[in-house]
Structures are given as C-alpha cells and as structure tokens.
Image (cartoon, grey):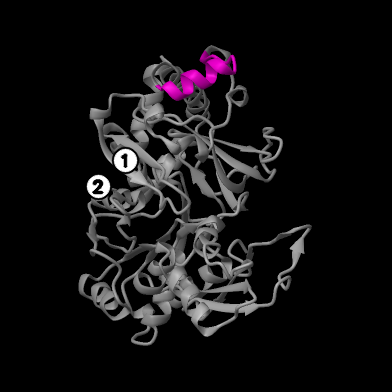
Amino acid sequence: MLEYLGPYIEDRIRRKGGDRTSTSQFLNTKLVQHYLVKYRRLRLKQALSFTYEHSRFYHDTMKKHHVHPNDIKTFDDVSKIPLTSSKDLHESEPFFAVPPEQFIKVFSSSGTTGPPKRVYFTQKDLQRQISSITIGLRMMYRLTEKDVARITYDHGYGIDDWGVRYCMGRATESVGAMTVFTGTRLPAQQELQALQTYKATVLMGTPSYLNSLTHEVQKEIDPKTLSIKTMLVGTEPLPKSMRKNLESTWNTKVFQGYGLTEMGTSVAGECQQQDGMHVTESDFLVEVIDPKTEELLEPGEEGELVFTTLSREGMPFLRYRTRDLGVILKEPCPCGLPFKRIKIKGRTDAMITIGSGDNIYPEAFNKVLFKLPYVIEFQLVLTKKENKDVVTVVIETNKATPQNKKEVLNQLNLLPEIDNGLNDSKTIHSVEVKFVKPNTIKRTGVKAKRIIDNRHLYE
C-alpha cells in the first residue's frame, strides 16, 4: 500500500502545488504526515539499494566498511555509511549508476584548485529537479503564468553549464512565466532597460550582484517604480543588512535558496516566513554532523550539513559532505509546511565566495603568488565598499618595487573569479596590493592566516 500511497501524496503536491493553502492543509493532516515519514523511509531504502547495486564507488566503499543497505533500518542508521567528500569526486565515472549514454547534461564547479567537479544527470534526474523547483516557485513564491522573470545568473564555467541558471530557467518556464535571459550579465543601464521593457516581476541572481545592480539602478530611477514583486537569490550568503537594503529599496521581499552542484543546484528555499530554508525531503535526506568527530548531531545543534540523494538515478550521492556549517531548526514552521528547515552559518574549510558568487580557495592565490620569487608570504583581506568586494593582498617581500607590484596585479587579475568580478558582474573593486616587510603578517604558531574576511556575510 505504501508504494502506492506515497507516490499519490507526492503527485498531489506536484499537481496542486500552486494552491499553497490547500497543499499546507493537506500535508498537515496526521494521516498524511504519518505516511510521509514512512514513504521517506521507503525512498531511503530504495535509494540505498539502488546505489549499492549500481554505483561502483559506493558498492566498493560500503563493502570495504562492511555495511549493507539491509543494515539501515532507521534514518539514524544512515550514519553507519561512510561519508563522501569532494576529494572523492576527482573522477565522475566511479559514481555512475547508469550507462554513460543515458546522461544528457553536465553541471560543474569552477575547478579553481584543480579539475572541476563534474556531475552528470539523466533526463529523469533533470525532470525531477526542475519539477521540484517548479513546485517551490508556485507554492512558496506564488509565481504564475502572469509573471516575467529576469534571471541574471551567468552561463557557467568553461565548457559546462552552471546548473542554477539552467534549472531555474526551465522551472520558471514550467510555471508558465516568461523568462528573460541574456548571453551574459548586462551593464546597469541595459539591465534597467530590460526590466522596463519586459515589465519583469521577479528578479533572480546572486545577492552581491543584485545589491550592486541596485545601487547603479538608483542613479537612474527609483526601483520602487518598477514591477519587481519578488527577488530570489542564491549561491552565496545573504547578510541581513543586504536583505534589508534590497527589500526597502525595491519594496519587495527577498527569498534565499540553497543548493550545490553535486545535489543538482537546488536543495532548500525560504518560505514567506523568511526564517530558515525548507529542504526538499522527497529528494534529499539532510543530516548535521560534528565536522571533526563526524558524529551525528541533533536538531538545533550547529555542525556540517550532509546530504543523501533519494531520487537520483544517474549519479547518486550518499552522505555527501557540503563543508557548509548549518543547523536543522527544531520548531515547526508557522507556514504549515512539514519539511525540515535549515540555516547556513558559515564554512568548515577555507573556501570563500567573492564577487558575484564565485567560489575560490587560498590555493588559487598560492599558485599565482608563490611562483613569484620575491613573494615571501601573503594575506588576503576582504572588505566591503560601496556594496562591492574589496580584495586587498598584503605581501611580505624584500623587493617592494613598482614593477613587482604591477606584475602581482597582472597575475591576480588572470584568476577567472577576479576577472569575472572586475569585468563581468562588476562586483569587485580593483584589487589592491600592499607590500610589507618580512614577518609583518601575524602568525599563529609558524603559519600566517591567509584569509581575513571582514565582510560579515553570515550576519
């Protein structure tokens, strides 16, 4: 019975997702909630069995650790399965659970510190992902065929698509709304012209880009006079101060989403309460672990977010470490949706987001700077000025010449993330280079702290 009732409940949500009140009432009946929990457990069991049988990586990993899908009886038992990290993804093929010819799309990360992480999707995977986003657009943000959505996300990295742009575009089209794409981001005046020409009602993009755009648009017109009624942002943190500025300037609500390439770009999103992001629990199991001990933590405890895909057929993931610090909220949401909510608190590693949502690691700067013979040590200091990132590179050297400073700037500007922020999204000021004497940078023990981030992105 559960095999039929679970899909019926899910199909009911997908068909009636536009009627938020009706859907919430339906989901909050005790009978439906009882079967939803059972259905998620069934989905987990099916996902584990499928992945074990078809993914070479997980089959070998679980056998090595003497774990079998039959050992997983409850959600907490998932902790018996070894964790997966981005380091395991240096090759995609071992994760494949279907023949290569069944894949139709590839999403990737930037690959700043090495080869990009490439995640492959079948047609069914993409349809499922787009369908889930479509439900969210209808149910939580009330998008209809009367809306016009301006999507400002860039194409992606190198030869591969950026999944968030692709999926948000297809989901918006599935709602029936018009989507306004451009080949790349536009100068502020052209962006304003597009918003006016198409009477856009929804604006999507990274918080930093939309914040920068806001200040440019204000020079030409009062943004409140435009048609924007909803802003949807993602791929980077949304500071409270930035949300407040966007909402007051445009006279609209700003909603934050969360996702990562490995999970198919979209995992969770805020509802009208704007207090935590609801996880798509029909597609993902979320856990929070202690990043050092790897022990499972309880709701309300802060730790590293870990996700397991429940509906992926092409390239499934079990207990994938996000390196994002977060918490599962304990209290039910006043909106009525019975899905777990998460809040992002920071990162467990040294990755930073600069400019318009580009992820970069200190290793990228290591490669560029330490190949210059006069660079002894460096420190990256990040601040905000006029709503753009300020990247200041402090370099210890005995040869502080104008020619060497010029060479450092040229090398830094070759980094794709710096180039994008300077020339495309225009969310970064010109990089500043400061030469200082050796041993000027403060050390902890014998190591200098490479990154000082004073932008307060998670506050």
Residue 115 in the figure: left or right of residue 351: left
Residue highlighted by disc 2:
174
Residue drawn at x 59%, y 21% as measured from the top left:
74
Looking at the rendered image, the quarter that the N terminus falls into is top left
Residue drawn at x 40%, y 46% as measured from the top left:
116
Compared with residue 87, is residue 158 higher up or lower down, i.e. above or below? Answer: below
Residue 408: image location, x then y, percent? 50, 73
Residue 263 in the figure: left or right of residue 239: left
Q: Quadrant of residue 210?
A: bottom left
Q: Is residue 128 visible?
A: no
Residue 38: image location, x then y, percent? 51, 22
Residue drawn at x 47%, y 18% as measured from the top left:
59
Identity, as a three-letter code, of the amino acid under mark 2: Ser
Residue highlighted by disc 1:
131
Q: Residue furthest bottom?
A: 219
Query: Is residue 26 in the magenta section?
Result: no
Estimate how packed mark 1 is, as few (under 14), some (14 to 19) or many (20 or more) residues with alpha carbons within 10 Å.
some
Q: Quick one: label 2 or label 1, which is nearer the N terminus?
A: 1
**In this picture, which residue range is highlighted in magenta?**
55-69
